[in-house]
Every structure is written in C-alpha cells, then in structure tokens.
C-alpha cells in the first residue's frame, strides 16, 4: 500500500482480560471493507492477525492478506496506532 492508499480503521472492538486476542478490527481499503482482523498479544509485542476461514481439510487459511512486506507494515501500523489510541 502506498501513501496514497485509502486505508482506515472503521471498527475496533477491544477485549479486556487475559486473552491473547486483544481486539477485533474492521478496515476499509478504498471502497471495500475487510472484517475480522485481530490484534493479538505475542510473546514480546502486539501483532496483527488476518481474517481466517476453516477449510474442509480442517486447517485455517487467511482470507485476506497483504501482497508485499511494505503493505503489511502499513496495515499493521495503521491498525496498531488505532488500537493504542
């Protein structure tokens, strides 16, 4: 995602307690909304989990993910900044 991309957090629902899941997030990418991103507590820091769907083989697969490392960094930065507000 570049600086000109329209990326914004449209909903952020925080969880209290000891769960590794700290929040569910919906984002807007241009005119599209992606639901089900998660802010998760890792061993050292917070990270962003992508929406997933369980397949017939019983495994979980991401249904949305950034195409490049830079896009992942931009997305993570926007979501974690909104979470920390």
Image: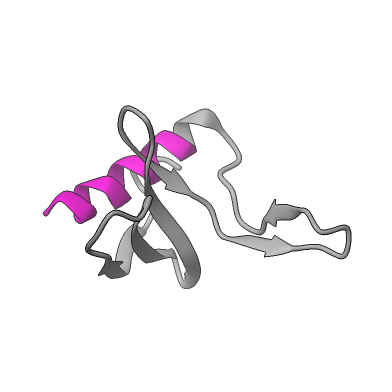
Q: Residue at image x 81%, y 62%?
A: 55
The dominant secondary structure in magenta is helix
Against 3, residue 84 (above or below) is below
In the image as oriented, which residue stretches furthest toward the front? 18
Q: Residue at image x 81%, y 59%?
A: 58
Residue 41's quadrant in the figure? Answer: top left
Q: Residue 77 in the image: x percent, y percent?
A: 30, 41
Q: In the image shown, does 40 or 50 lie closer to the viewer?
A: 40
Q: Residue 31 in the image: x percent, y percent?
A: 46, 72
Residue 63's quadrant in the figure? Answer: bottom right
Q: In the image shown, does 34 or 24 lie closer to the viewer?
A: 24
State how many labels appear: 0
Q: Quadrant of the N terminus?
A: top left
Left or right relative to 16: residue 38: right
Q: Is residue 27 magenta?
A: no
Q: Is residue 75 magenta?
A: yes
Against 1, residue 36 (above or below) is below
| Colour mapping | one colour
Q: Residue at image x 16%, y 50%?
A: 84
Residue 25's quadrant in the figure? Answer: bottom left
Q: Quadrant of the C terminus?
A: bottom left
Left or right relative to 83: residue 22: right
Q: Magenta residues, as a range? A: 72-85
Against 43, residue 36 (above or below) is below
In the image as oriented, which residue stretches furthest toward the right? 57
Q: Residue at image x 37%, y 30%?
A: 43
Q: Residue 15 in the image: x percent, y percent?
A: 27, 65
């Amino acid at each position: 995602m570049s600086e000109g991309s329209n990326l914004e957090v449209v909903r952020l629902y925080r969880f209290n307690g000891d769960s590794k899941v700290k929040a569910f997030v919906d984002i807007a990418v241009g005119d599209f909304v992606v639901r089900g991103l998660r802010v998760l507590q890792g061993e050292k820091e917070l990270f962003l989990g992508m929406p997933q769907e369980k397949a017939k083989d019983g495994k979980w697969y991401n249904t949305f993910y950034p195409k490049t490392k830079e896009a992942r960094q931009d997305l993570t930065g926007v979501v974690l900044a909104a979470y920390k507000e």
